[in-house]
Image (tube, helix red, strand yellow):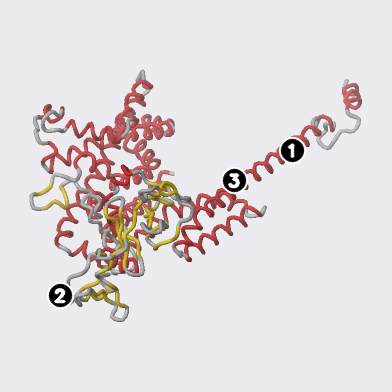
Amino acid sequence: MTTQVAGAGSERSPHPGPSGQAPEQRNPRRGQGGEAEKIRRREVSTGFIVSRIAVLSIVAALLIYAIPPLLQTESWTALGVLGAVTAAVAYLYLTPRHVPAKYLVPGTIFLVAFAIVPIVLTFVTAFTNFGDGHRGTKEEAIRAIETSSVTQVPGSPEYYLTIAERDGSLVFLLVDPATKAVQAGTADGLSPVDGAEVSLTGKVLSASGFTIVPTAQAAERDAEIGAFSVPTAGGAIKATGLSRAFEGKADKKYDAACDCIVNPAGDRWYANETEGYFIDSAGAHLDQGWQVSVGFANFKKALTDPTVSGHFLNVLIWNFVFAISSVATTFALGMIVALALHHPRVRGTKVYRVLLILPYAMPSFAMLLIWRDMFNTDFGLISKLFGVHDWLGTPTTARLGLIVINLWMGFPYMFLVITGALQAVPKELTDAARIDGATPWAGFRRVTLPLVLVALTPLLISSFGFNFNNFNNIRLVTNGGPYAIDNATVGSTDLLISYTYRVAGFDSGVADFGFAAAISVFIFAIVATVSTVAFWRSRRQEEVYS
């Protein structure tokens, strides 16, 4: 019997391989497999070529877009960095080597462009006097002082004026009444315009390369047009209304010999490179200054100036209270709801979960405005229910109200992520704790909670950083108030970020970006320190429970 089976096997497979199987049995579709491998390689090559073309096309488009303004502003350092990065990316994607870098470089570039660069610029700005009156260079300040002092004198040239734009910038199209010649006046000076169509009244109807601004739109930009001037050899050209312009003489001139501004009366304002102003002998300065380095003056002001430091510590303490309370309350409520719906006996969990995430799904700005109206003194629902008629008018209730609002808006997200973390907790561990005699509270505290915290610690840290800078809640609900009678600079519910916003001058129109950047550096240092310590402790906790 054995011999017959062996013989049968020999007939089917006269030359068995090392494994005892016939070649056809070992690889019955060798031909088809080779074709599949060729197709797979062809698809990989096609995908690689397409991705290479896409990346290089994006880089080329960015290069074409960035080069003209950099050349115009003579930003040679930025131009050199852009060229070096472009060359490196082109080399990387034109060579078959360095495959891992091809995937890492795009993310790294975006990280540098949108995270590292803004941080570096904020640090640099913190050491300057950048702000209103100190936005440009010394040369720009001199030009602004001279052109702003232009006055019309008898016999000065006059022009027909047409307001236009070129590349988004304001332009004066000037028509000489005698010759009908058309010139374009920009912040850099005058240039001839050929082929312009001019009406009998001197209005420029069309000009190649320029967009004529309609009269109604020009009227809305009256302040911008009045402040605009075209520098000339004898002074500057200014607008008088929307249809006329004159070339006047500057009452103030810069004298390079004394590095000062002089006027016809002989008054002098000398350049002060420390403050970035032209200052006279009495200590008064001209309005226009320039950007200079002030060292640690902004940081010193934040810590020593009584008008600032007197409120800085209180704002910082409330900032910590708000951020920690927001994280703690949203986590606690999210945990309670997640545990309740995680129980196997609960029915209708999908419906409950949909209802519970509604606050998180709604637009935050709309919800904040609704909550603000609910706290309204006259018709607010919460004010009427609790009998507090000025809920946002006193510091304690206003702060409590903000924490309640943040709890309502933040716990659904915590509920979602905690639900996912609970589903990842091994059931064997909770069953073992129950068998060992642990009470439900002891099992939660010693098994479930530590495992959930290991998974959610990064989320809690990021939530702290977000709430530490939660500008929207403060701005839309209390706007930092209530304010003291003698102080309109900082309110009882101001966070450092909203205080920085006010210091920067976005409300008052008098910007001090250098000082605001210094406070932003303090905020960055605080959040970075807290996050570093928290991550260090979370790693230790993870080692214990891993």
Q: Nearer the viewer, mark 1 or mark 3?
A: 3
User: Which quadrant of the figure has residue 360?
Assistant: top left
From this viewpoint, which residue is outermost toward the bottom? Answer: 257
Q: Which residue is mark 3?
A: 54
Q: Residue at coordinates 85% horizontally, 35% vertically from top-left?
A: 17
Q: Which residue is mark 1?
A: 37
- Image x and y of residue 306, in percent: 14, 62
Q: Quadrant location of the C terminus?
A: top left
Q: CA distance from mark 1 to mark 3?
A: 26 Å
Q: Nearer the viewer, mark 3 or mark 2?
A: 2
- Image x and y of residue 509, in percent: 23, 53
The one nearer the camera, 177 or 359, is 177
Dot 1 alpha-carbon crowd within 10 angstroms: few under 14, some 14 to 19, many 20 or more = few
Locate residue 478 relative to residue 88 in the image: left or right: left
Question: For numbered disc 2, what is the local secondary structure?
Answer: loop
Q: Quadrant location of the N terminus?
A: top right
Residue 473, compared with residue 311, is above or below; it is above
Is residue 493 visible to us here? Answer: yes
- What amino acid is at disc 3? Ala
- What amino acid is at disc 1? Glu
- Image x and y of residue 57, in percent: 58, 48
Q: Which residue is mark 2?
A: 282
